[in-house]
Image: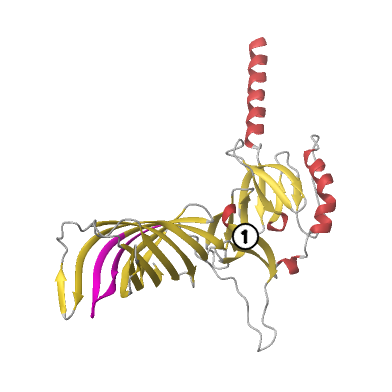
Amino acid sequence: MKNHLLRYVLIMTTLCCTSVLTNAQDIITLKKGSRIEAIVTDIKDDIIKYKYFFDPQGKGSFLYKDMVSSILYQNGAIEKFDNSEQQSQVDSYGRAEAIHDNTQNVIINNTTPASAQNNYQDVVYLKNGSIIRGVIIEQVPNELLKIETADGNLFAYKIAEVEKITKERIVTQTAPQQSVITPQPMKEVKRFQWGVKGGLNVSNEITDNGPTDFRTGIHLGFFMEIPVSTKVGFQPELMYSMQGGSSKIGYIFETDKFDYINLPLMFKFYVWQQRLSIDVGLQFGYLISAKVSGGGETINFYNYEGLNKFDVSLDLGLSYKLTDKFDLFLRGNAGIIRIIDDLSNRNSVSQLGIGYRF
């Protein structure tokens, strides 16, 4: 008899534990129809804080109340979030009742009529100037947010990339002269970008006796921008550059023609959104051609023993992103190594150009 009684107690205990474990999660039903298995931790103001049921020790998330249709709590109570009378089925634990009592005024006073909700959308303004319109479906405090656009695309952004978040009315067409504003999907911020750039060189040589006259030429090459933070980027480049200068010797004008392959390593400090930046860095160059022309003759002295093939310059400039594809930049670089060992001449170049990002 005792064995039968003990077996009965064990079976009932197992069934109770199984029932508790299988119903230990809260079910959050969104107005779009999807469901989240969660553990609701707090409800206040216009947000619902929760943790994922499968990761109760992980970081918390939250949803806006106007995104949620109802919550089925683990004790069987149901809380609805709409304009109808709030209904809660409370068991002996009273858990849902406590939550409902703490949030009842907020729910009633802070909800927007369903017809008005359909006329509003979430708008996320990024620090790089992009604007994303849609519905924020998830937001982790101080970490990230996820927004779904009208065409079903889902984008995730770090909070550090966000300038502000607002709700704005969707303007519908009421007259021929008015246009319809529809959500436009924006591309997610790329982790790095690369492209081509080129433009005008105006160069001369700085000597102990002053600067020489100018030589005009071009620069052309590739670049890659790697974000360091929302305000700083690192941009290595590989460039072909025509440099040198001209001077008058007697009655003859002579032009030094130095062509380099340069490797600028630039840090970009954004001072206005992510469009205007101050660029600072070092440039390393290798001489690939050295000629002097004047009096109708051109002499190649690339193999001259005292000619320095390597060059190092300090670079300073400004860049402005005209669009997401095109950049405009102005840069100057000053050489710190002599071009020829027994002369004081150093490179000096001013550059104006445009870049295209792929």
Q: Residue at x 66, y 36 (%)?
A: 24
Residue 238 location, quadrant: bottom left
Q: Residue 348, how many percent across, how many down?
A: 35, 65
Q: Which residues are magenta?
A: 235-262
Q: Which residue lies under the disc numbered 1?
A: 163
The crowding category of the residue bearing disc 1, from other C-alpha atoms within 10 Å (few below 14, some 14 to 19, many at least 20), is some
Helix, strand or loop under label 1: strand
Which SS does the magenta portion mostly show? Answer: strand
Q: Is residue 24 above or below residue 133?
A: above
Position above or below: 230 against 131: above
Q: Residue furthest front?
A: 250
- Residue 1 in sight from this viewpoint: no
- Residue drawn 41% across the image and 65% down it: 332
In magenta stretch: residue 261: yes
Write the residue at 53% across / 60% down. 270
Q: Nearer the viewer, residue 229 or 58?
A: 229
Name the quadrant containing residue 184: bottom right
Amino acid type at circle 1 is Glu
